[in-house]
Structure formats: structure tokens, C-alpha cells
Amino acid sequence: MAAGRNDIRTYRGFGTVTYLCLFILYAPLIVVAVYSFNASRSITIWEGVSLAWYRDVFTGPESAKFKQAAINSFSIAAIAATLSTMIALSAATALVRGGRFGLRTLSFGLISLPLMVPEIVTAVATLIFFSAIGFTRGYLTILAAHIAFCIPFAYMPISARMQGIEESYEQAAMDLYATRGQAFRRVLLPMMMPGIVSGFLLAFIISLDDFIITNFVKGAGVETLPTAIFGAVKQGIRPNIMAISTMLLAVSILMVTISYFVSKSDDAR
């Protein structure tokens, strides 16, 4: 009975607030997705279903710009997610499995700091840093900034997964004459894979969707999809922008779905 009384779903108005929040969050996304199939050039007048604007993204006058922006976005996201996941795995191993050491709390705070600092502050600080060391802005500055920014996002699921694995598994492997490195590679690492995959996918999405930091540190002539979309929107919102946004949304949904099924399959095992 006590559990029923404390169930937040029984509170008056909880359902209304929940549905209102869901509507505010997802209604704009649904509108963009629906109107990306509009046959009209207008973004407010519906004239029927058409794939013309999706074809325009790939074959229209701006297709070359968007293609290069997509190549930049996906290549940066893949490299940044891979490297940030490797760094996050090393950090999680040190902080979770490394025992107590003098700078443990400080190290955890430094890793978590980018999650709490406003992104605009991170963007300005990164721009000042690159300018101070004379690093020419371009593809590499975006990549370096994304690697640093994605580390805490990859660290969270990896650390949570590692904390849920008892050390007795590794100790049992070492009792059977495995070295610490062998116990890590053959016992801990396979058990860590769901967390590693989730961390990689989260870092990939964060990098792919980032606009603020990218807009500050990119050089002239280097665009990613978010910055290319922003530049196109300044000239007026066109249906092809909605088509690109819908495809980006689909990629994000795909990544979240993969992460969900990876976690679900691990729970089943």
C-alpha cells in the first residue's frame, strides 16, 4: 500500500504535465518530419505528398555543399567518438578499478566538468586556446574540440557499466594464472562491451549534432551539417532543409535504437 501511495503517477495532474511536456518536445519534430514530404515550396501550405525535397538534397543546386558537409560531419563524428571512447574507457578503468589515489576526486571532477559548463563557454574557451597556440582553424580544430567535448558523454555509460561488474570476475581469472592485462582483455572487456557501445553511440550523436562549438572553431570553407543548415536557414527556411533535418533525426533515432537493443540483449544474458 505504501508503494502505491508513493507512486508519482497517482499524483493529481501528473499525467497532464507529462503529456504537455511530451507535446512541447516532440510536436516540432513531427511537424518538420511531416512537412519534409510536402510537395509545395511553402513550409506552411500542404499540397500533397512528395519526395522531391529529398531528391533535391542529393541532386539539387546545393547538393554538393550538403554532401561535403555530411562527409565532414560523419567522419568527424566517427573519429571523435572512437578516440573519446578509448580515452573514456582508460579513464573509467583508472577511476573505477584503479583503487584510491590522491587525484581521483579531482580527475572525476575534470571529466564531468564539460557536462556542467555552458557549451558557449566551452566554445569560446576552445576558440581562445586555438588562437593562442596559433592553430589554424579548420577540420582538425573541429575534430580536436569534439574529442575533448565527447569524452564525458562516452565516460558515463562506460563507468556505469564497469561499476556494475564485480571485481571477483577478474580476481577469479588471476587466480587461474591470468595476468592483470589478460583478465582485463578476456574477462572485463567483453563484459564491458554494452557500455562501450552505448558510450560510442552517445559520443557519435553528440558530435554529429553539435553546432555551437563547431561554429566557433571551424575555419572558413569548412562546414558540418549543423553549420550548413544554419547558413541555409539564414537565407530562408526551405523544404529541403526540413528533409535534411528529418534524415538527421532518423540517424539519431537509429543510434538510440541500436543502443537500446544492445543494452536489452545484455540484460537478457
Image: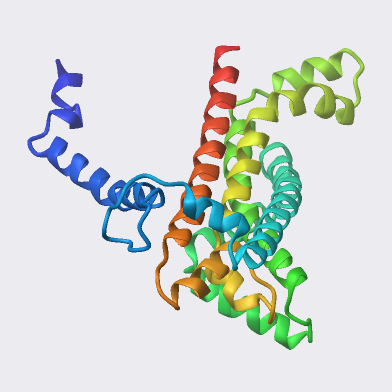
Q: What is the x, y in percent for residue 182?
A: 88, 26
Q: Is residue 213 left or right of residue 233?
A: right
Q: How many marks?
A: 0
From this view, report whether residue 119 is shown above or below residue 269: below
Could you tell whether 211 is left or right of 15 in the image? right
Q: Residue 227 versus residue 47: which sits nearer the camera? A: 47
Q: In the image as oriented, which residue stretches furthest toward the left? A: 12
Residue 20, above or below 122? above
Q: Which residue is at a point 73% across and 66% down the rendered structure image?
A: 144
Vertical placement of residue 195 versus 150, above or below: above
Along the line of sight, the residue nearer the viewer: 82 or 6: 82
Query: Quadrant of residue 19 in the image?
Result: top left
Q: Residue at x 70, y 23 (%)?
A: 191
Q: On the image, which quarter does residue 2 sit in?
A: top left
Position of 22 with respect to 256 (left or right) is left
Q: Position of residue 29 (x, y in %)?
A: 36, 50
Q: Is residue 224 visible?
A: no
Q: Quadrant of the N terminus?
A: top left
Q: Does residue 108 lie above or below 265 as drawn?
A: below
Residue 216 locus on image (x, y percent):
59, 78
Q: Is residue 188 left or right of residue 122?
A: right
Q: Nearer the viewer, residue 91 or 86?
A: 86
Q: Position of residue 57 (x, y in %)?
A: 56, 57
Q: How is the rendered protein coloured?
A: rainbow
Residue at 33% x, 63% y: name it. Answer: 42
Classify the position of the C terminus by image quarter: top right
**Whether residue 160 is visible:** yes
